[in-house]
Image (cartoon, coloured by chain):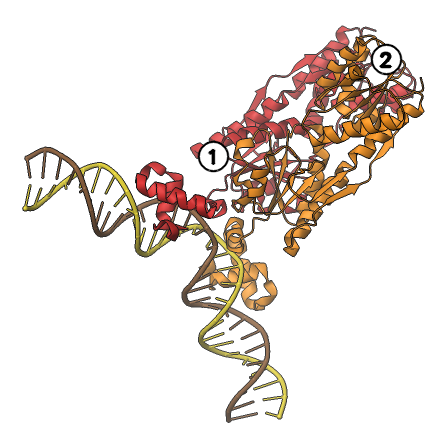
Chain colours: A orange, B red, C yellow, D brown
Amino acid sequence: MARLAGVSTATVSRTLSRPEKVGAATRARVMQAVAATGYRLNAAARDLRQRRARAITLLAPNLANTYFSRIVAAVQEVAGAAGLRVQLLDSQVESDRLGPVGSDGRTDGILLLDGGLDPEIVRGWTVPVVMVCEWMDALGLPCVGTDNVAAMGLAVDHLADLGHRRIAWIGGPPGNVLSAARAEGFTAAMTRRGLPLRDRDRLTGDFTMASGACAAHLWAATPERATAIACASDESALGFISECDRMGLACPRDVSVAGFDDIDFSERFIPPLTTVHQPRAALGRRAAEQLIAALESGEPPPAGRQILPSRLVVRGSTRAV
Amino acid sequence: MARLAGVSTATVSRTLSRPEKVGAATRARVMQAVAATGYRLNAAARDLRQRRARAITLLAPNLANTYFSRIVAAVQEVAGAAGLRVQLLDSQVESDRLGPVGSDGRTDGILLLDGGLDPEIVRGWTVPVVMVCEWMDALGLPCVGTDNVAAMGLAVDHLADLGHRRIAWIGGPPGNVLSAARAEGFTAAMTRRGLPLRDRDRLTGDFTMASGACAAHLWAATPERATAIACASDESALGFISECDRMGLACPRDVSVAGFDDIDFSERFIPPLTTVHQPRAALGRRAAEQLIAALESGEPPPAGRQILPSRLVVRGSTRAV
DNA sequence: CCGCGATGTGCAATCGTTTACATAGTTGCC
DNA sequence: GGCAACTATGTAAACGATTGCACATCGCGG
């Protein structure tokens, strides 16, 4: 190929990467040879030479989760615009293959959406890491997220404002940082509003619809059951309402339900779900920008948590007692 | 690192990749040096030398779409087990950067979920390609999918069996192969059952909830409106039902609705959606296996379409007239 | 004691680029 | 006309592994 154009490989390389550094006649000859041979630059070789991967890795627990799709799309969009590929890894499925990920030269940076990883593994990574949504207390990693405690308080306040006094809680998986923060927000708001925190009103879930449906049965069987439910996720809220419907109980007639996340379906559910909106695309975008800026500047991304605003969206699943 | 252990780099390489080919004493020394220096194998260099990328690329239109998440997760799972990474690309967002993707040495194969790409671009790729769900008539590429025509017929038959005679259609985006196949299935079944195909009953959508909601208004305004709706996607069905609810019309009381895809929310919608189940995880898994088998054997994946079974799931959104 | 196969290592080429440096022309200025 | 400053190109050394081949060592049978 270089021979065909009668030049050295160095000139071919220059022609392709910095055309202005090469003579017009040569450039034309090279371009013609490129077209003739269907030559393609081997990006892997270039990346090796330049010691960069031109790729970032997105590490999330359970990729099948709807919640992540918007974030993934936003990340891919920002990364693509910067000429970086996005590699996907499921931190649950691949849990034992995670060690080399951040130091095998095939990624320039990591977007970590799972706060439950072994800190030692993360510490072993040599590339910059930015966390999204979740965080890890053990490591002072930069993180882009929302104020889960305050946001959960918004939902509880809304229910309290509607006159509900017995408010139940469907939490997330124990051990998860989001679960903890949202539970804390629930408890704090209940206390602040002087509402009773009854043990039987604290149900534990795992963010899924199935867990919400399961909670519905427990709730229905509770004596003096709560008149409103605050959920740690939209999916569990939807599962709860759906199961209530099957039991002949209607939302919001028999129970008010507030969710958390504002996934796409919440707006179109029947009833439309009152929930706390999470700016998922913005979270993904911001985190990706942060990481990419760090890669380009060579400096580590600014540590500390960066909070994007979330807000309560009142729809039809909640009403006054 | 090699010096520290007092051996050549060749021996280090062998120790790490084929430990049995190296003496026990040497192995121990190398391992110790590895541990001491925190040495990490540079996968990029190995990949270059071995002329493989150890990665496959998943190319889908609109990654934010819920429909894909299950497929992506399944692909990632299979690929991960085979030691391959998964790279994500949005074929819409990245449409102008698609050329080099299949021939720049950074991917070993492509899983293509978008049948709307320029065939010339796809033809230019040098790595094996397996299509999933969608297909391209212009290229004889291998494809893993379902029988959309027959499956759509199942839904129409079900509505007809319930006694519906005026059945409306909410299609997908024009030009999409799935839209076309499902529309064909609808038309064929209607004809077969001797039901009228009225122009005003053919609504066009784009698979989204918003388009379903929009269609609801058109449908409601139709004189002698249809008593049942067949939709080309679950999302549009959900959007339709939701918008009906807002207009004071209830499903299935005022209209029966059948969807297509069986996304996770359909089962939990109120009413639960009658729909055609697509084995999304199986599609992703099978396609990934096919591609990986081709990579390992060196032979191109078997051409032709591979059909996985889909079935009708009857739930609460349809009932007899 | 010699030769042969098996075993364990090192040498050096290789993968396909990029890039620091050297070199050969060209131009311009005094 | 000579020297400096450019410009355009080639040479060759990286990048960091893998791997074919050569070589040394060892054990063993004849």
Q: Marks 1 and 2, how far apart in space?
A: 53 Å
Residue B204: % across, % down: 80, 27
**Are dots 1 and 2 on a single chain?**
no
Residue B269 makes an appearance in the image: no
Please state, as top left, top right, bottom left or bottom right, where the C terminus of chain B lies in the image.
top right
Q: Around disc 1, counting alpha carbons within 10 Å, would you say few (fewer than 14), some (14 to 19), or many (20 or more)?
A: some
Residue A101: % across, % down: 55, 40
Residue A196: % across, % down: 86, 20
Amino acid marked by disc 2 = Ala
Residue A179: % across, % down: 73, 28
**Front one among B81 and B4:** B4
Q: Which residue is mark 2?
A: A250
Q: Give the number of marks.
A: 2
| Dot label at residue B295 | 1
Q: Around disc 2, counting alpha carbons within 10 Å, would you say few (fewer than 14), some (14 to 19), or many (20 or more)?
A: some
Label 1 SS: helix
